[in-house]
Amino acid sequence: MKEKILDTLKKPDKIILQGIKSLTHITGSITGIDFNFYSKIKSEAKGKSELTFIGEKKMEEVKLQLFKYNQDQCDESEAISDFEKIEKADTSNNYWLNLHGIHDVDLMEKIGKALELERLTIRHLIDTTQRPKVDDYEDYIFFSVKSILKNDEHQLKIEQLSFVLGKNYVLSFQEEVGDHFDHIRNKLREDLGLIRKRECDFLLFQLLDAILDNYFETLDLINHEVTLVEKETLLNPKQSTLLLIEKNKKDVDKIKKSLSPFKEALTNIMKDRTHFIDKKNRKYFRDLKNSCTNAIEEANATYAALESLTNIYFSSLSQKMNETMKVLTTVATIFIPLTFIAGIYGMNFENMPELKWKYGYYFIWGIMLTVLGAMIVYFRRKKWL
């Protein structure tokens, strides 16, 4: 990790290119999507009242996974074609259906029809430009958030994740295959923790908590980069250092803008006292909200640290320039009288007094060296050297 960051600092051209790319997508600072590019698609879809996928297609084939579980057993299946297997009237079992890939509009409509989801919910599910939000319907809750992680190239990877919480089921929708929830699947299979002993709202808490962990992990990586960049800023500030600082500031700003609606959605859940969140599980969502607040505070602190590094960078650069100008000015000042003397005796007049004196050359060198020594002593006493 450290070696990669230090190597990046040595390649300012690469950082400049990444900076230019980020500027071209500034309108998609929260979602990672260029809104200008997709605004026409959205307008046409609304005009025709059609369901249209809006976003980047990140995988070819949609993958599904269904868990049917209770306190005593857990069944897992992937070849799913009949979504009515999720029996909403079945109070003895809970269901978790997870999808990787949300670009298949027909499939999304089929799921919505089987589970009686509102058309507006389907529209939100397939629109990756949506701001994180929560909607409380009569039969379910719709919850949409953004997951943020750093990839191997130190770029933010932003993914929309949506959830539908019913009385005995949770639907989760991911843009691509990821390992956000692998530990939760393992808990279900091995009957670890409380997931199989609680209702579906506790499963939703676990899923949201896993996403929030991604934010903390990303902030930790950025803070580690800040530590390395801080050393570079203090010891040897370069253009690549400043570009890396600005890149991290943009990343932290995206995190802050994604966390704020995340916290807002959790606040709405607690405020509305929805009947889908059991009273005994509210404390977990309250804790999730507090964790979200902590993440926002950490993001603010990281952003403030990066702002300070920017100021330190310019101060260090200014100080280095002042030191350089000081040395150049001193050297120029020392050579001004020497140049004057050389200029006087470089004139080719016949009647110059010392021109034909056999010791004149050595005399002039003595004067020049005396002036040079005197000025150096004077500058040192004044602490200019």
Image: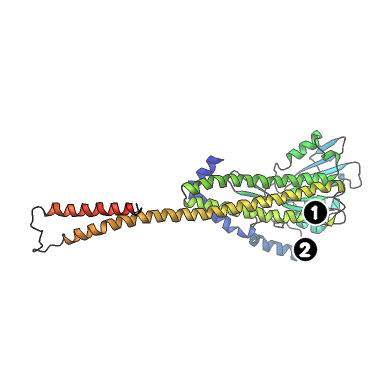
Identity of the residue drawn at 64% across and 62% down: 36
* Residue with the mark numbered 1: 142
Q: Residues within 10 Å of mark 1 (few under 14, many from 20)?
A: many
41 vs 111, left or right, is left
All told, the count of numbered labels is 2
306 vs 372, left or right, is right
Q: Residues within 10 Å of mark 2 (few under 14, many from 20)?
A: few
Q: Which mark is residue 342?
A: none
Colouring used for the render:
rainbow
On the question of residue 330 being in view, the answer is yes
Q: Which mark is residue 49?
A: 2
Res 261 → quadrant? bottom right
Q: Is residue 273 placed above or below 79 in the rendered structure?
A: below
Q: Is residue 385 placed above or below 182 in the rendered structure?
A: below
Mark 1 / mark 2, whichever is N-terminal: 2
User: Between 65 and 222, which is closer to the camera in this rendering?
Assistant: 222
Give the mark toward the camera: 1 or 2. 1
The amino acid at mark 1 is Phe
On the question of residue 136 being in view, the answer is no
On the image, the x and y values in percent for residue 82 come to: 84, 45
116 vs 178, left or right, is right
User: Between 198 and 353, which is closer to the camera in this rendering?
Assistant: 353
On the image, the x and y values in percent for residue 88 come to: 89, 47
The secondary structure type at the circle numbered 1 is: strand
Q: Is residue 135 placed above or below 224 in the rendered structure?
A: below
The amino acid at mark 2 is Ser
Alpha-carbon span between mark 1 and mark 2: 21 Å
Identity of the residue drawn at 16% across and 55% down: 364
